[in-house]
Image (cartoon, rainbow, N blue to C red):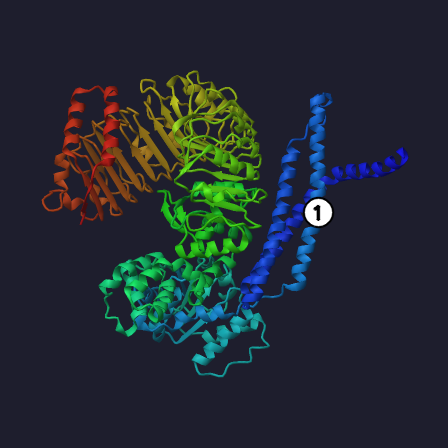
Amino acid sequence: MAETAVSFVFPKFLEAVKMLRDLPKEVEELTDELESFQDFIHDANKMAEAEEDNNRRDRMRKRLMRLRKTAFFMEDVIDDYVICDEKQPEEDSRCAALLCEAVEFIKTQILRLQIAYRIEKVKSLAHTEKDWFENHFPIGSRSDGSIWDNIRMEPHFIKEDEVVGLEGPIKTLKKWLTEGRKERTVISIVGMAGSGKTTLSKQVFDKVHKHFECHVLITVSRSYDIEKLLRDLTNKICEERKEDPPRVESMDRMKLIEEVNKLLCKKRYIVLFDDVWNETFWDDIKFALIDNKNGSRILITTRVGKVVDFCKNSSFVEVYKLQPLSKEKSLELLCKKAFGYGFDGCCPKDYEEVGLDIVRKCECLPLAIVAIGSLLYRKCKSPPEWRRFSQNLSSELQSNSELQSVTKILSLSYDDLPKNLKSCLLYFGMYPEDYEVKCGRLIQQWIAEGFVKQDCRRNLEEVAQEQLMELISRSLVLVASFTTDGKVKACRVHDSIHEMIREKMKNTGFCHYIDEHNDFESSDIIRRLTIATSSKCLSECREESHVRSIIFFTKEDLSEDFTSALLAKYTRLKVLDFEFTRLWDVPKNLGSLIHLKYLSFRKTSISSLPKSIGELQNLETLDVRTGEEIEIPKEITKLRKLRCLFGYRISTIEVKDSLGKLTSLEKIHELVIDEDGVVIRELGKLNQLRDLRLSNFLGRHSDSLSSSINEMQLLERLDIFVQYMTEPIDLHITSSLSKLRKLHLVGTLKAFPSWILQLQSLVKLYLKYSMLNNIPLKSLGNIPNLLILTFASRSYKGETLHFENGGFGKLKELQFKALYKLRSIVIDSGALQSLEKLHMFRIPKLKTVPSGIQYLQKLQVLDVLYMPTEFQQRIYPETGEDHWMIKHVPDVLRMLNFNDQLLLDLVVKIGEEREILRAIEWMERASRKSASQVVGGG
């Protein structure tokens, strides 16, 4: 009996040993297989979306959900292995002999063995699902010529009297096409899908073709064949000239290029290539389009910005970025389509309010307005019917076959994206409609989700930034705001794109959005959750789930019981975002989320972090910007993968002598320095830092901070806030800090730091409370990339600032705030030639307009806030003697509250400098609440 047991157990034991030994190799193979499997899903999904048979498409989508679920299983197994592998004890550890270590070792081996068996199972499942799909739905070549090509051809046949809001663009493009340089020129119209590019190009093409001996229009498909395109071009040229075309069927590419060259030789021609997608299109076509130096033009419409970039390499290029219609023009277009010949050029008053609501929901997108207007013409004949239609517009877009073409056309841009960019775009569906998401938040979430892959030349954020710019260049993402140095600060997606994304999410299980209109649905496949309603909707959610991310947008209180129960159900989370929610307590079981990479408590009401934060071994981003000072526990130093630590004020009491262990840190703000400055020495160990912001700094720690900063070769931003203004900052920076772009110094300076003048990459300089008697403006003006310069409260104690000829050539924004001894500003005629914004705030002794301000021809904005009465009167539009100096500025803001002004004058007269700082700050805060008066400059 014993022999039988041994003969049964021993082979099993050997099998287990082999499986454990081969596990790393198996995981590597599974990772490769997952990538191949995801490519298969990508191709299968393309085929399903192109399927015209609705029943067959629905069957394919259902089976695709099974494929995706299998892919999720594969990802989960790989993630579990990574976590388990990180727990392995070192081989030479002497502690392994101890009983506790031995028990832990056995537990880990059991877990590894379970993973090995799960890998076998999921591999088998993947092969089965893939074979079934291939047998029933063979993936063959997909034709681009579908019914949707016919739909997108409709703009070519819009009547001229139906065109709205294109008068200005047509005039500009007509001038570009018929006038100007003799060299061959590419003129590109860039805009998002449905913005009217085709309509505009056809209208202007019809108006100018008489100026050319030869004119041809070609519609370019997404996956065009260059030989076929050249054959079409040859035939159309001959047809237009009423000549017999050559036999092009047997010609290769070179012969076709020669034939087109011959047909266009010595002729002034215009060719319209409509709807170009491929970035390399110009490289394919440029040799066929000969440059006769007689004013020939190529007109291209595209939704992909990079198409234009390729043209610029070998030809003259003009770019017209098509903007949305105004609300008034959008309403006019809607009424033209909805009322037909009964429209007299003015929207009936009974329809105006609901009409504006409809075009707002369309975000003034002509494609959607035309489709909806046509439907209203046939089905809705009264204002109440319009209102009902507007209320149900989202569901109409999904269910109405006449409106589905809008979503389908927008989907073409999505279908053309590579895999990782598809996930990046779908992520906007986790945010509410019209939501402007900060790019920093979005990028860190993309990284946590694994949508961004490491690049040997760039860090993860730079790669993610490039991916965002790619989506923007494809007109899929809209820029909501820019920083002054030209970087995207916030972004969003068009409502129609958002609707398309939501539809894609439903079909792929990418995310489930729960709000008051959309409860939790029992589903086999949900990868992400957005919770924008009460917790009651989640009471029935399944225990076993693939959910990787949760973002909250609810305005209701989040109880600790609810959040703890939620985290217990979803233990594989990688992203957990409580931003702006009513959260008072950190969930007690937070430490169980060992997969978590992104955690945000921003703008919540939590007051501290638990020690369990140290158990989140994979955490990369922690955001605790709650508005209060947060004390971080010592356990946080276990987070060796932490890259970003954000807080309004982060107390270092517990970590002041161990912060240096966080060697992966790239960004940390705002760090409160301890009295002894111990944490400053720890900062010197963090040589990956790119963004460092410090508060409560003491002047006596200048030497130790200088030493630490000199070790930070990657530093891009540095903020220093001094605790007591009596202790001056005296940094001795010997490092080049070649990457430093932004510098904020708030505190007394012994003298203007000479090392600042060596910062070749500096874009922004902000000085406050510096108490400087002298600022080397001439040398400062030679910093090559400086765009923003702020002299804030008490930064300068002199009476005059002189901007000399040739200085500050790239500066775009200049601010003066609360400089109480400044009497005059002089601007030479060749200084500040790129300045766009000038801001002057509370300068009580500056009673005359800056001399030379009239030379600033690029100045767009002039803010004059709480300036002396004499100054205000001199620039008053009707009676001001110096108004002529600023009349070229389009936007002038004047603000003067006399009570505040009198108080300020009194404080300045009787107060000592250090004693009035609090009063100054109070008045600055009060000014933000005051009403403003806008007066036009011209």
Q: Residues within 10 Å of mark 1 (few under 14, many from 20)?
A: few
Q: Quadrant of residue 110?
A: top right
Decide which of 291, 497 is in the foreground and name it: 497
User: Along the horizontal axis of the image, is 496 left or right of 384?
Assistant: right
Instruction: Tell me if 611 is positioned left or right of 332 in this view.
Output: right
Residue 161 x, y percent position in the rendering: 30, 72
Count the numbered circles shown: 1
Residue at screen point 70% across, 36% down? 112
> Is 852 placed left or right of 502 in the picture?
left
Q: Nearer the viewer, residue 444 or 660?
A: 444
Name the quadrant containing residue 155: bottom left
Which corner quadrant of the image does residue 255 belong to?
bottom right
Instruction: Describe residue 333's horizontal placement relative to residue 397 as left or right.
Output: left
Q: Where does the N terminus fall, quadrant-wise?
A: top right
The x, y position of residue 462, in whole percent, is: 49, 42
| Residue 24 seen | no
Return the x and y of residue 195 as percentages of the image width and height: 38, 61
What's the residue at 51%, 60% (across, down)?
A: 280
Determine if residue 328 is in view: yes
Q: In this picture, is 266 found above or below 350?
A: below
Q: Secondary structure at mark 1?
A: helix
**Residue that numbered label 1 is attached to:** 121
Question: Which percent across, then down, holds residue 693?
Answer: 41, 29
Q: Nearer the viewer, residue 904 or 558?
A: 558
Q: Amino acid at mark 1?
A: Lys
